[in-house]
Structures are given as C-alpha cells and as structure tokens.
Image (tube, coloured by chain):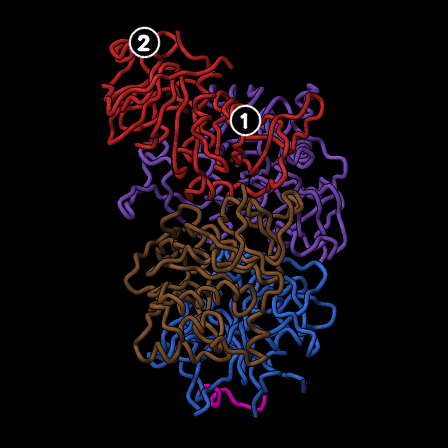
Chain colours: A brown, B blue, C purple, D red
C-alpha cells in the first residue's frame, strides 16, 4: 500500500483528453495550484489534456490556477455555482465569446450532487431552485405538501485536491476552510489525486481525526511549499 | 430621509436572539454582525465550512484558508468548527439555521425573492443564494426600499429571475419593517417622518396594517 | 450559549408520549445507557413517555438499555436493521406476541435516510433492496440503465446520543467506533440530547477535530463514568 | 470429500490483491482475513465505521467501542480511520470497495443472492447485507456447495427472499469455484476427486465449461 507518487507530472498523468475533472477549493482556499499548473505544463508540452469539463465552485481568478487553464484553452465546460471573482476575465471572455460552456448549479446542490456521486445515490430531491430558471427541465415532486426538484449525481474521472497531511494509505486532513469541497470530490472521482503539505507515517494521523479515509484516494504527491491562490492574486502573479 | 445601510443592518440585528445560528449573505448583510445587542452572541455560519467565525483580522494578518463565503478573511471564536460543503449545506437545507439575512433586487408580497440575476446579460452566478432561502427557520431581507432610480423593490410579483418561491418572511428596508403573512405585506414599523400614504406610494403592492404601526427609531451608527 | 444541563432527568425531560426517538449506538458501542435508563426511570415514576417509536440499528440486548425500554412497555415501534443480538428476548417476545411493530430497513439505507432527514433531502434513490421484499410498495426508477428504489428521509423528535468530549456550544467528538449513527441522528432530530464523557471549554476541541458541530446539538449532560452496554451484558446486569 | 470452511476461506483469500479494500460479511466470511497470501495486505472495512482494522485482541483486552459489524472486538492497524455510518455506506454503495465476500443460503445463476431470510417465520433481520451486494466492484460468495440436507445452494432461481438481484460474480464452494457470466454458472475450478457429472448433480443449474477446468487444490489450513 503506497499511494505516494514522486512528482507533480506523474500525479497529473492520469488526466485524459475530454475528462471530467473536479478541482477542490472555494476561491483560493484549497485550490491545488501546483497540480493545476502541472496539468497546464503538460498541455503546453503535449497538447493534452484538452476539452476538459472542470467542476469547481468558481471559474478561476486572475491568470493562475483554473483561470490559467481556461486561458490556455484546455477547458470546454465549467460546472460551478459562482463564475465570478476579483478578476474573472479568463472565464468571462471565453463565455461571452461562446467558447466555453457553463452549467450553473446552486452551491449546496453542487455539493450534494458531488456527495451523491461518491455515495452511490443517482438522484435526490432538494427544495433548492424550485420555481426558478435553474430548475428548468428537471423533474419535480411533492413530499408532505412541499415541492422539490430532482437532482442527479455528479461524478468525475479525476479529482485534484489539496490536503494538509497525508499518509501512504491516502488518509487526509485539511487546513481550516480549505476543506470545503475536497472531501466530497475525493469520493466522487474514479481517480483522486492529492497534493499534500506533508506526508506522515501511517498512524501519525489519529484515526479519529482522519477527514478523508484513504479508500477515496489514489495518488498523493508532496508539495511542501504550496502557493495560496489568493496570495498569488494579490501579488499579481500570472502563470503565463 | 431614510436609513443608511448600517442602520438597516442595526435594525435587523435587534431581532437576532442570543445563541441564534445565523447566516449573513455576502456583501451588505455581513454588516449585521457588527450590531449585535450587548449581552447577545449569535453563532455565525458561513457556507464554505465554518461555524462561529468572528471579525476580519488586522490587515496583513489574513490567513487565506480562513475566509467567509464572500472570500474575505475572518477569524475564529472559541467553540468554532470546520466541516465540508455537504455538511455545511445540510445545516442550511436541513433547517438548522435560525436566521438567514440576505440582500434583494426584488421581494414579492408572496415571499418570492429575486436576488441573484438581473437578467440574461453577462455571466450568471448564483452561489449559495438559492440554498439559503430554503431551510433557515426565518429568511429575512435587508434592502433599500426602492431601487437607485426610485422604483419599488417590494412588488406584487418579481420581474427578475427568482431565487426562491415564498421564502421571505420579513423585510427590513431603509424606510420600514414589513412582514410577509399569507402572501401579503404587513407593515410593522415605519420611519415616523413618513406617512403611510407616502410609504405606500413607494411600495409595489398593498401594505396591510394589523394592530398598529411602530415607529422605526434607529440610532446613528 | 450554554447547552449544558445539570442532570440526566433534566436531559430526558424533552421526550414526550408518542415521540419518535433516535438512539445512537451500534450494538453496545455508542449506546447512551445512562440517558436510556433515565428515560426508563421517568416512565416508571410517571407512566410517561410511552408509545415511543425508537430508531436504532438494533433492537436491544439483554435486559438493559433499549431492551429494558421494550421490557418496560415504552416502545410501540422499532425502526432498525438488525433486531437480533446475543440476548434478543425483550424484542423477540413482544414482536412474536404482536405487541411491538417493526420497520426493517437495510443498514446503509437506514443511515442514509437519517442523514437525508438532517440534510433536508426528502427522498433519494438507492440500489439497495431493489428487487427484494424490503422494496415492496416503494417507487422505483431507472438511471443510466440501472434500477433504484426511492427512499424517504427519517426524522425524529429527539435524538439520544453518547459523545466523548463536548463543549457548551455542543461541539462533539466520539470514541472509536462508538461514532456510528450518532452524528447523523444529531442532524435528524428536532432536539438532540447528548451524554458526554467530559465537558471541556469552548476551543479545547480543535475546530479541525469537531465531528458534530454544535448547531446539531441542544442539550449536553456530563456522564463521566458511563457504562458500556456490552460490558454490562457480559456482567449479566439487568436494569430491573 | 469436500473443503472445510477454512479451506474455502483460504481459496477466496488467494484472489484478494495487495492493497484491496475488502468487506467480509459477518460470521464465516470473517475467516478470509486469516489467509492473506504473504506479501499482500488488504485493507478491511467494517460497515460500523472502521477502515484498516486488524485481528481480535487477546481475551480480557477488548475495547467494546472498537468492534466490527459482527460486534466482535477488533484492533487497529497503522493507517486506520473512523467515520460515521453514512460515510461508511457511501464507501459501500459508492463503488469504493474492491471486494465484498458474503455467505449465502442460495445463489442463482442470474447472480441473485439470498442470504438474509429463511422465510416469514421469526424475527427478520437484514443488517448491511442488502447494501453490501451493491457497490463493491466484485461481490463473491463463500458457501458449502449444498445445504445440510444435501440440496443444491447454487440454483436456477432463488426460492428464499432475495438480498440482491444479479449481484454475485463468483462463488467459492466446498467443491468448486464458479463464476457467474451472462446469467450462467461457468465452472472454473473443481476438486480433482469429483467428476464434472458428480458436481453437476449437486448443482441446481447447468454448469458451463469455458476453456478448461482447473484443479481446486487447497492446502490443509
């Protein structure tokens, strides 16, 4: 049992053309910048992976991370709740030009759809979006006198997430609100790739404190000095 | 004469009980946290996975892994907890929040809320708005009574894309406090400097009065 | 904000006649024996609360805990996955005599229905029980070529659970596999009552290690020397 | 001549890869854990909320908060994790387990399994059986080839209440190893002391042979 891989290039090798990729993070908290940039490096060197569907709460900020993927032309579709940010140019330009598709999902529904994908629940009912244009075309049903919208699970080929601690079984902890969508995405992807701040021995993470059990994790790469997206944005960094 | 945003936020804060679990929408509603009456402490929830966060840290001391739903840096109070997004929205959708206080483009007398989209132009973004309007035991709105060009924001039926149907129960405006009861606006409080007729003229649906109108007196804040 | 109550009697005062009560635990691990016995004491003294619907993975063991509630005649209905144990007399006798109702639910469906109750999801689809007699009468639907059963949320008036640490906000941790259903039940009950091994100051539980955030908890009572159901069974203890 | 339960468990254990995530049904299937080939370590899951548990502790050293689904005391291996029941069954139902190995009253050639109820008498109890048959990448059964009174347990259609439909892909019996392919039994291995005709006579549905039958040789264990 050893899920540790040697470097970022190896970690992102699993992403194929046309793949659906869940990327952890809410704004900059939890954004796996190094994994994303390794994927961009691969695309620049080989032209692959392209035509990606990316699932994230947002749609990138500035000229780094997911925004840089979009700039690079790797992303065919975004599934997100809030495609705005302090500097949303990358997505906005492509979207208004009709060069990128958008599936807009309420944030709680996005989280629950991802969890459902990981938990083997193909569909569920939620009050969220009932009677709004985001429910258009979706089945509705009444339970105990209240109306609900049927939502479907979301799964992915690959999840790219950022953790605080990892062991070689893939047990993970997160840092503060950088947790957000990552534990759910780890469940919902066929292959989950993690960049961890530190790799520790099995047993060093108290079994009571494991947030993502290793069963949901496939590959772990150590990135000790990970960048924080928000900090990069404020420094004006561009990944170009 | 009308209330400032801070004064509207102050008024909304007076209705939050000690120990209440509260979600404040991003932007203007965040101000409500500043005006908790002394002796009361609400527990603030942010949908990106924190309960019991506190004020912003001093500039330069931000930890960008410790942010609220508006992506602003926050701090923790003792007794805080982190959790993932599915648990966070279980709190929202599952009826565990006591109050959600949100902004609005329009509120209809039916309790319908429009606060996420001004129409088909540009890039649509919804965030957690459609989730927050469902589940909190009380969904309140704070808003200017009219739009920047003077049109009513309290209307018979919303003209903008809906965030939720029949979800709002109280509106705190720059001029009044209005409850929504049985799909009608019921006026509870208004600025004493404004007549009922004047207020009605600025409102897009009929204001009912039940058992008296309280003067809306708010201190300078 | 202070959810601490002085004693067990006060803690269980919230349970009313005819209530639906979720009780944490899987076998003896996590069984809140002291809360249960306080409820039995109240019933013996006052004749209330009776006609209870009890939701637990099992249906009691020996002559203590839930089994003692059943013996006492407080329980009208059990919702559980496995009404057997090393000494299942209490439930078996009443069940075969037609004096107690049973709703048998597959264990994973039971867990997911309770979570759904806590998460505001009125219904969901699961492959579990499709084509079996436990799916009789339930709606079925096909998603991506596979058949699923529609299951409904489970909610309760009161949850009685056992925690390891609690603070006065109601933040909780659990001990080992005593965690099981308790974090879900805390979400799904209108009022959640906790017996905690220790009560600590707010902040003493690392915010990263909180398993049940206080928003799901209403009342906490300290039971420093809690009994372990399995240990009592092996000692032959009866609560009579 | 037939394999003992321990020998059936041994044979099933040979098909579990290093690092596989495995759930063993309560009772007889738990024996499989004892026979992992050297150099391989599976990670065992128990539906009551533990990954990577190990053997029973010595008598007297049990911690009754550290038990498996059969309520037997276990120990932890380094790299273990605790989680609640919804997460545990997310692992099961969500397709995250590599193998589930279960007991059976009957297995049909369609892959249907009956292992939870012997009929309407007594107190019914299902536990996690109906969940476990869905989701694991491979659902295998270990069982005596026939019932105590000599009737086939491998049948055309189950007569007892079903646990799951079309879920079993391999059966390890006291006489043979049989795959279920396209709703037919395909014989892979049999005891060399038994002829195909003899095996067929003890089996309630036709045994297909595709590309040869391997001798089922199992050491004394």
For label 2, the crowd category at 10 Å Cα-Cα, with few meaning under 14, some 14 to 19 and many 20 or more, is some
Q: Which residues are magenta?
A: B192-200
Whether residue C178 is visible = yes
Which mark identifies residue D194? 2
- The single residue placed furthest to the front in the displayed view is A45
Please, what secondary structure does the residue beneath circle 1 have? Answer: loop
**Occupied quadrant, residue B117:** bottom left
Tell which subunit mark 2 falls on. D
Please, what secondary structure does the residue beneath circle 2 have? Answer: loop
Asked if residue B49 lies left or right of residue A187, the reply is right
Q: Position of residue C154 (x, y in %)?
A: 47, 44
Disc nearer the start of the sequence (1/2)? 1
Q: Position of residue D106 (x, y in %)?
A: 34, 20
| Residue occupying image coordinates x 54% and y 44% | A2
For label 1, the crowd category at 10 Å Cα-Cα, with few meaning under 14, some 14 to 19 and many 20 or more, is some
Q: Position of residue C45 (x, y in %)?
A: 69, 32
- Depicted B165 relative to depicted C232: above or below: below
Please name whichever residue, A216 or D113, is drawn nearer the observer in this view of the structure: A216
| Residue occupying image coordinates x 28% and y 45% | C142
Q: Nearer the viewer, mark 1 or mark 2?
A: 2
Total labels drawn: 2
| Residue occupying image coordinates x 50% and y 38% | D19
Asked if residue B60 lies left or right of residue D208, the reply is right
Asked if residue B98 lies left or right of residue D154, the reply is right
Q: Which residue is mark 1?
A: D70
Looking at the figure, which quarter contains the N terminus of chain D?
top left
Whether residue B181 is visible = no
């Amino acid at each position: 049992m050893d899920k540790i891989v040697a470097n970022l290039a190896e970690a992102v090798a699993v992403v194929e053309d046309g793949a659906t990729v869940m990327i952890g993070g809410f704004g900059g908290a939890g954004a796996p910048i190094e994994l994303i940039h390794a994927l961009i490096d691969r695309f620049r060197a080989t032209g692959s992976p392209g035509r990606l569907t990316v699932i994230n709460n947002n749609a990138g900020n500035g000229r780094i991370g997911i925004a840089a993927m979009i700039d690079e032309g790797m992303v065919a579709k975004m599934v997100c709740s809030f495609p705005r940010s302090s500097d949303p140019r990358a997505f906005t330009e492509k979207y208004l030009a009709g060069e990128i598709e958008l599936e807009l999902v309420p944030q709680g529904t996005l989280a629950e759809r991802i969890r459902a994908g990981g938990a083997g629940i193909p569909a569920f009912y939620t009050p969220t979006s009932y009677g709004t244009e985001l429910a258009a075309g979706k089945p509705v049903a009444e339970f105990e006198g209240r109306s609900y919208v049927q939502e479907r699970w979301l799964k992915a080929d690959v999840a790219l997430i950022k953790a605080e601690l990892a062991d070689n079984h893939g047990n993970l902890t997160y840092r503060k609100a950088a947790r957000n969508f990552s534990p759910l995405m780890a469940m919902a992807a066929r292959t989950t790739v993690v960049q961890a701040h530190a790799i520790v021995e099995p047993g060093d993470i108290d079994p009571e404190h494991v947030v993502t059990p290793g069963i949901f994790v496939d590959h772990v790469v150590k990135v000790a000095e990970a960048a924080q997206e928000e900090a990069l944005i404020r420094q004006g960094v561009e990944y170009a | 004469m009308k209330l400032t945003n801070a004064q509207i936020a102050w008024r909304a804060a007076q209705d939050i009980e000690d120990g209440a679990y509260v979600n404040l929408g991003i932007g203007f509603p965040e101000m409500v946290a500043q005006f908790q009456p002394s002796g009361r402490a609400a527990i603030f929830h942010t949908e990106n996975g924190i309960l019991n966060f506190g004020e912003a840290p001093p500039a330069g001391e931000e930890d960008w892994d410790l942010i609220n739903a508006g992506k602003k840096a926050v701090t923790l109070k003792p007794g805080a907890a982190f959790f993932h997004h599915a648990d966070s929205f279980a709190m929202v959708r599952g009826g565990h929040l006591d109050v959600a206080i949100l902004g609005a483009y329009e509120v209809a007398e039916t309790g319908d809320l429009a606060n996420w989209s001004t129409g088909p132009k540009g890039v649509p973004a919804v965030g957690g708005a459609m989730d927050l309007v469902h589940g909190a035991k009380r969904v309140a709105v704070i808003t200017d009574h009219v739009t920047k060009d003077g049109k009513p924001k309290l209307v018979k039926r919303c003209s903008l894309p809906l965030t939720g149907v029949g979800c709002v129960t109280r509106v705190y405006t720059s001029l009044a406090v209005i409850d929504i009861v049985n799909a009608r606006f019921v006026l509870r409080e208004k600025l004493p400097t404004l007549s009922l007729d004047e207020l009605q003229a600025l409102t897009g649906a009929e204001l009912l009065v039940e058992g008296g109108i309280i003067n809306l007196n708010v201190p300078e804040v």
